[in-house]
Image (cartoon, rainbow, N blue to C red):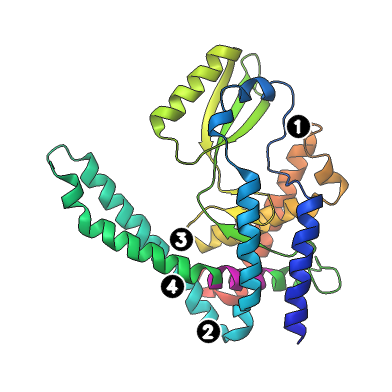
């Protein structure tokens, strides 16, 4: 009964927090950002739709209640199985890319057919197991936060919720005269290297600025967006890092994230420290063999 009440409270919290949290890592439009977006509007990442879809995913996961369904060892095995599947998908994708990059292979569709079939089967299996793995890691991180006293009436606020998916690329814009970030625009993760270079050059020439497109590991929207990975230590640290941004978004340090570079640095430093400490606590408690 208590676990069901807890899951209902989590769902209610999601709805409330979607209204009041903007997410510290979601780029804010200031100064040159509007002029930059003239070149990026058609390829910008759709945060509202991602948040909406992920929220429903989290509600469905809460209904499953997998951390309370299986025992401790089964929960560990589910997480490890998810990591193994993710690694196999990455390796298979790499082998497919090698076929398409090989000029000596004429019929690339035929040569890659078996690998593409294997990839699709692995992806389907990953889709089936990921809700369980995510729910388990959320619960383990919640317990770690409780041990550190970062909870309200036994629950972290906001609740720990994350979803793994391809993360957007970040177009970073800086003035040429000194190193400073004057714009940070999230663009589609599907942009090819050539498209990224063309975007950098177009914005740089148009605004007389320095530009660079870089990958990002996570975004402090809510639920938190985390890049797919096989590195459990990094994953736990990143989930906790991004949760900290959401936690601070309800407090002055987070609300003033973009006011000055110093406040942004303080915010990121705090999230780094919390992320590393909470992630380590989970590893010590559940996955000591990784240490």
Q: What range of the chain is rendered magenta?
A: 132-141
Tag 2 and tag 1, C-beta contact below 8 Å: no
Q: Residue at x 62, y 70 (%)?
A: 60
Q: Earlier in the sequence, mark 4 or mark 2?
A: 2
Q: Residue at image x 64%, y 62%? A: 56
- Quadrant of the image occupied by residue 53: bottom right
Q: CA distance from mark 4 to mark 1?
A: 41 Å
Q: Residues within 10 Å of mark 1 (few under 14, many from 20)?
A: few
- On the picture, is 171 further left or further right than 275? left
Mark 2 sits on what residue?
Answer: 73
Of the numbered discs 4 and 3, the one sitting upstream in the chain is: 4
Q: Is residue 137 located in the magenta-colored stretch of the structure?
A: yes
Q: Which residue is mark 1?
A: 261
Q: Are marks 2 and 3 in contact (CB under 8 Å)?
A: no
Main secondary structure found in the magenta portion: helix
The residue that mark 4 highlights is 81
Q: Position of residue 14 (x, y in %)?
A: 74, 61
> Rounded to the nearest whole Å, what is the CA distance between mark 2 and mark 1?
45 Å
* Residue 69 position within the rendered picture, expressed as x and y whole percent measured from the top left: 60, 85
Residue 187 seen from this side? yes
Q: Residues within 10 Å of mark 3 (few under 14, many from 20)?
A: some
Q: Earlier in the sequence, mark 3 or mark 1?
A: 3
User: Upstream in the sequence, badge 4 or badge 1?
Assistant: 4
Q: Nearer the viewer, mark 4 or mark 3?
A: 4
Is residue 263 one of those drawn in magenta?
Answer: no
Cβ atoms under marks 4 and 1 closer than 8 Å: no
The secondary structure type at the circle numbered 4 is helix
Residue at the disc numbered 3: 230
């Amino acid at each position: 009964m208590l676990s069901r009440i807890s899951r209902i409270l989590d769902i209610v919290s999601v709805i409330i927090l979607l209204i009041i949290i903007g997410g510290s890592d979601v780029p804010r439009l200031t100064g040159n950002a509007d002029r930059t977006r003239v070149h990026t509007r058609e390829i910008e990442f759709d945060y509202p739709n991602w948040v909406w879809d992920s929220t429903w995913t989290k509600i469905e996961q809460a209904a499953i209640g997998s951390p309370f369904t299986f025992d401790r060892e089964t929960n560990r095995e589910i997480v490890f199985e998810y990591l193994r599947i993710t690694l196999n998908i990455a390796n298979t994708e790499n082998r497919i890319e090698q076929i398409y990059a090989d000029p000596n292979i004429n019929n690339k569709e035929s040569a890659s057919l078996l690998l593409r079939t294997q990839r699709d089967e692995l992806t389907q299996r990953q889709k089936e197991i990921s809700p369980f793995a995510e729910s388990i890691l959320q619960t383990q991180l919640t317990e770690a936060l409780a041990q550190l006293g970062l909870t309200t009436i036994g629950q972290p606020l906001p609740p720990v919720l994350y979803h793994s998916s391809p993360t957007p690329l970040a177009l970073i814009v800086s003035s040429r005269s000194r190193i400073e970030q004057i714009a940070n625009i999230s663009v589609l993760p599907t942009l090819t290297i050539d498209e990224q270079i063309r975007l950098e050059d177009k914005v740089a020439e148009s605004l007389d600025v320095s530009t660079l497109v870089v990958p990002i590991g996570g975004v402090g929207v809510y639920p938190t967006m985390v890049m797919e990975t096989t590195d459990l230590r990094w994953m736990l640290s990143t989930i906790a890092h991004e949760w900290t941004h959401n936690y601070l978004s309800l407090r002055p340090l987070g609300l003033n994230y973009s006011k000055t570079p110093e406040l942004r640095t303080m915010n990121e430093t705090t999230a780094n420290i919390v992320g590393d400490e909470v992630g380590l606590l989970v590893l010590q408690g559940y996955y000591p063999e990784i240490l």
